[in-house]
Amino acid sequence: MNCEIRKWKLTDAADLASALSNKHIQDNLRDGLPYPYTEKDGMDYISAMLSANENDTFAFAIIVDNKAIGSIGIFRQENIHRQTAELGYYIAEEYWGKGIMTEAVKQICDYVFQNSDIIRIYAEPFSYNKASCRVLEKAGFQYEGTLRSNAVKSGNVIDMKMYSRIKIGI
């Protein structure tokens, strides 16, 4: 199944709300997202992404058949890590296991490496999220190690895994 990434549009808010009002998705994301996730929450998020500094925030909708089915973003870090950025993503549950996220990760990494001075992109999936780890591996990321007892999610202390992809030629 083919996908594309593109800048968010305010008209994507309903699709975003539909995808994020799912506990299976929110269980794999950081805390702070409202549940249920409303169309207004989506409009607020999209507005923030559209007004963010384009050299620091690379935020896109994942599109299949002209529908926003998920979100993907790369966020520049600061100070000595200013050429490093963190990757985050999710797609609606009905699109899991179809290779879409791997393709979207490849697309955004290629875009950021070609259009910025970022040299390292990393991701920290929860260790129990095997599918996310596999996405990163298939998209050219290398596993760097386990961050033990690195987060508290739903009252549980959990490990996270560290993956990175380095810009070729540095």
Image: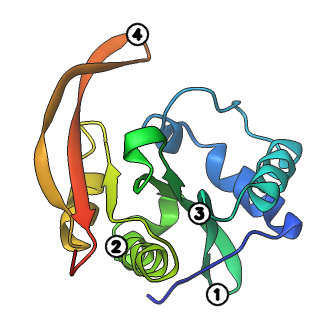
Judging from the image, what secondary structure is the residue with disc 2 in?
Answer: helix
The residue pinned by badge 1 equals 65
Residue 102: give its label.
2
Q: 72 or 129, which lies in front?
A: 72
Of the residues shown, which amino acid type is indicated by label 4?
A: Gly
Front disc: 3 or 1: 3
How far is the residue under mark 4 from the one under mark 1?
A: 38 Å
The quarter of the picture where residue 128 lies is top left
**63 to 8, vertically: above or below:** below
User: Is residue 76 toward the left or the right of residue 40 in the image?
Assistant: left
Q: Position of residue 162 (x, y in %)?
A: 22, 43
Q: 86 or 3, which lies in front?
A: 86
Of the residues shown, which amino acid type is indicated by label 2?
A: Thr
User: Is residue 39 toward the left or the right of residue 59 in the image?
Assistant: right
How far is the residue under mark 4 from the one under mark 3?
A: 26 Å
Of the residues shown, which amino acid type is indicated by label 3?
A: Gly
**Callout 1 crowding tier (Cα within 10 Å): few <14, some 14–19, many ≥20:** few
The residue pinned by badge 3 equals 70
| Disc nearer the start of the sequence (3/1) | 1
The residue pinned by badge 4 equals 155
Q: Quadrant of the C terminus?
A: bottom left
* Residue in the image at 45% along x and 75% along y: 104
* Residue in the image at 45% along x and 50% along y: 82
| Disc nearer the start of the sequence (4/2) | 2
**Callout 3 crowding tier (Cα within 10 Å): few <14, some 14–19, many ≥20:** many
